[in-house]
Amino acid sequence: MNEKVTDYEHLASQIKDLSKQLGFARTGITDTNLSKAGEQLKVWLGKNYHGSMHYMQSHGSKRYRPDQLVPETIRIICVALEYRTDDMQSMESRLSENSKAYISRYAMGRDYHKLVRKKLQLLASEITKLIGPFGYRVFTDSAPVMEKPLAEKAGLGWIGKHSNLLNKNNGSWFFLGEIYTDLPLPIDEPATNHCGTCASCMEVCPTQAIVEPYVVDARRCIAYLTIENKAAIPEDLRPLIGNRIFGCDDCQLFCPFNKFSSESDIDDFKPRHQLDNSSLIELFNWNEDDFDLKTRGSAIRRTGYEGWLRNIAVALGNALRNSPQDKQILAALANKTEHPSALVREHVQWALQQSDTTD
């Protein structure tokens, strides 16, 4: 680190200006003290709310001790990058169309990990131009980093009852990123909580995964079930998933603060391959090569081809509950009854059984 730099107040202001020029909506700086968040994490893990996400506990205290993950870290520069590219009314409408696929809006375009990380690296390079070499490492939803508690401490927003970060002027449709650094920058004031008595997110959660304010049981969360979970989706939860085949946005979609959110103008976040308006059957008919080609550079790859078919089979089964004799759906499912994957076959059989289900 360049020892000649002494005006860290000015440097912090310059960093925020540079960050804005790179397209980040907000930037804040905080210290490394995550003791409260660390205790909350231990309780959450103790209740097994992480399900099969074993990586949540595999790094010990590094997750809430940034200086253990990156030695000599004393500050974290936190940024927010908005990603919503369509209006919320359209998203809400898509949820009611049984034959259409609903994909969480963060996964519509290019994989945000690469985009945010690239911008953070550019920001670090610009800081280097100002002060010379310094110690840093960039992160975005990667490695054992407690992004939301850090962002809350840095003043970017508060953690809402749905466990997502909320900003009273911009809602929650944004990605987070961090630069761990050894620069002794001044820290910002933490955000204050504005949820009040509102419980919209808890009420609309399809699987009631928000088991108490600010606590999500991932094992019931559709995002977990359709992405992180690699096993069978519990049968009692399948009817509740509806047409959501990759993630779920409901807790954001119906949050009052998101009426203040802005649409992103970043082209890379715009939907690719018409994923914002595709039928379940069309996506179910993708072969593995189609999946590989059309999800290249996309966060959707995280679920894998088997998981993709598993998720869509569940959604098709739910569509059959509304249209039991839909010949196109029945034919699409019948075409996969002999699929090589036992996981896929199980969910296809369940889906076919829904044509005989009456409420």
Image (tube, rainbow, N blue to C red):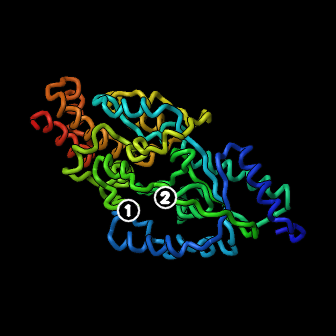
Marks 2 & 1, CB-CB < 8 Å contact: no
| Residue occupying image coordinates x 36% and y 59% | 216
| Residue occupying image coordinates x 34% and y 34% | 95
Amino acid type of disc 2?
Ile
Q: Quadrant of residue 33?
A: bottom right
Residue 332, horizontal then vertical, whole percent: 24, 29
Q: On the picture, is 283 further left or further right than 158?
A: left
Q: On the picture, is 160 further left or further right than 285?
A: right
Q: Nearer the viewer, residue 13 or 120?
A: 13
Q: Quadrant of residue 98?
A: top left
Tag 2 secondary structure: strand
In the drawing, what numbered circle is on residue 215?
A: 1
Q: Nearer the viewer, residue 45 or 356?
A: 45
- Mark 2 and mark 1 lie on one chain; the one further toward the N terminus is 2
Amino acid type of disc 1?
Val
Mark 2 and mark 1: Cα distance apart in space: 10 Å
Packing grade of label 1 (10 A; few <14, some 14-19, many >=20) is: some
Q: Residue furthest top?
A: 327
Tag 1 secondary structure: strand
Q: Is residue 279 above or below residue 213?
A: above
Quadrant of the image containing the N terminus? bottom right
Q: Which residue is mark 2?
A: 159
Packing grade of label 2 (10 A; few <14, some 14-19, many >=20) is: many
Q: Nearer the viewer, residue 165 or 199?
A: 199
Residue 238, horizontal then vertical, whole percent: 23, 46
Q: Is residue 104 above or below residue 320?
A: below
Q: Quadrant of residue 41?
A: bottom left
Residue 317, horizontal then vertical, whole percent: 21, 37
